[in-house]
Amino acid sequence: MSNIGVIGTGYVGLTTSVCFSKLGHNVIGFDIDKEKIQVLNSGKSVIFEEGLEDLLEQGLKSGNLVFTNDESSLKDCDYYFLCVPTPQDKDGSADLSYILNACSILSKVAKKNSIVVTKSTVPVNAWREISNYLNRSDLVIVSNPEFLREGTAINDFFNPDRIVVGSSNKEKSVEVLELYKNKVASFVITDNTSAELIKYASNSFLAMKLSFVNEIASLCEKVGANSKDVLLGFGQDKRIGDRFIQPGPGWGGSCFPKDVRALLRVSEKNSQSMELLIATVNSNEKSFARVVDKLENLLGGSLVDKKIAGLGLSFKAGTDDYRESPAIAIIERIIGRGAHVSAFDPVVEIKEKTNFSKFSSLIEVLQGSDAIVVLTEWSEFKRIDPSTVAKLVRQKIVLDARNILDKDAWERSGFKFESLGNWA
Ligand code: UGA
């Protein structure tokens, strides 16, 4: 078993820590946030992620998982996984300051001849800067991008499609690969720069795929086609694939928007224009606007002084993360056109002040509303009984921007119902 230090205990770091400890490694999760460390050591997760708290408890109980904010505890690790955030800088590029802070700790405490693994999404060629900053010729840097989706991160860790490891030292890359004890996933062993680019290319391609799907769904409405059938037929071609083609209000989250912009910055810096990516960003903005236009049309052409019930705030179901959430982007645009929005989400808690009202029960949100718009695909929204809702609302109008509701059931209760792309 290996001794692994994980620097950063956010979505990626915490998942990586508990999963490596489940595989039997000795894991030290390090974070500068003392409060977080206390909470984690008491067995409580600091994020909402399916299955994570169970693994956390198991790891702490077995004694092979511990969290600390003491830098010196990291001195005996063989591998250091950098899992700190790389937020977006003012110009769209990724901000490396957290990574470099972590490197300054490692340059002091890292064990001789150990391996520093970059798991956070870092800009292409960041490994060079990391190497300079570490200033330790005995340390090898292996780039090992994460492909974890929030909400299914634990499953993605244990059942990845592929594991990518890149460095100038193939043996060290293989060592990192072997930590995953994965006999099934494909793997790619490459250099650092290519490994870093694989991550950006993957997220950007997926965002582009979704924008295309959303445009096709919108075209379905114009030409009278059914997007569910169109995408079913389209996805059956194995070269296209039937996964990740669910039309929605637009893509968001803490990764796609940031990574697409970061790749655009890389392309600009290298005088290599990426036209498809520019179009992808514009297309996503338009998909938010399309949802608002549809709602306005359903309400007879004006949103002024209308009371809208927004169902869902997280950027997708299964997470409490609302960073760059399409739900919030759309709510802001609805408010911008003069409406009042009341929102409900089963897990998101926004502590800051917002220009929309937040309620902790569906009934309060639906009461007296002129229209309901479904913005996140939480399964509990599928179970809402339209006949009960009919008694609460002022006008019976539903826009299902996630294509999850049963149109017939809502129409039977007298609702004017629309999905995206004539889905239902
Ligand atoms: C994404 C990638 O999928 C992961 O592989 C990657 O590791 C991660 O970013 C990251 O860089 O850390 P995540 O941000 O958790 O994962 O979310 P996704 O499940 O990819 O969804 C992104 C957005 O696309 C969401 O707004 C979601 O609602 C939307 N989406 C997704 C659709 O509209 N339709 C789909 O069929 C799938």
Image (tube, helix red, strand yellow):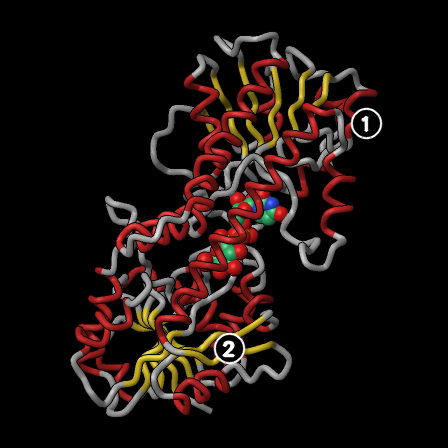
Q: Residue 400 in the image: state x and y as whole percent.
A: 66, 29
Residue denoted by label 2: 188
Residue drawn where x is 51% and y is 23% of the image: 342
**Which residue is located at x 20 percent, y 82 percent?**
109
Judge depth for marks 1 and 2 and give the one in front: 2
Query: Looking at the image, which is closer to me, 283 or 10?
Result: 283
Q: Which circle's residue, 1 or 2, is located before the other in the chain?
A: 2
Q: Position of residue 31 (x, y in %)?
A: 30, 67
| Secondary structure found at label 1 | helix
In the rendered view, would you say 81 is above or below 347?
A: below
Left or right of 23? Residue 396 is right
Quarter of the image for the C terminus: give it.
top right
State whether residue 349 appears in this view: no
Separation of marks 1 and 2 at Cα, in angstroms = 48 Å
Q: Where residue 62 sits in the image (x, y, percent)?
A: 50, 82
Q: Please state which of residues 175 and 63 is positioned toward the viewer in this rendering.
A: 175
Q: Quadrant of residue 404?
A: top right
Mark 2 crowd level (few <14, some 14–19, many ≥20, 10 Å Cα): some
Q: Circle 1 sits on which residue?
A: 409
Whether residue 348 is situated above or below residue 24 in the rendered picture: above
Q: Nearer the viewer, residue 19 or 82?
A: 82
Provide the secondary structure element on which disc 2 rests: strand
Residue drawn at point x = 42 percent, y = 73 percent = 144
Disc 2 residue type (three-letter): Val
Q: Residue at x 51, y 48 (%)?
A: 207
Type of amino acid under label 1: Ala
In the displayed structure, 119 sits above or below 368; it is below
Ligand 1 within 8 Å of the CB at mark 1: no
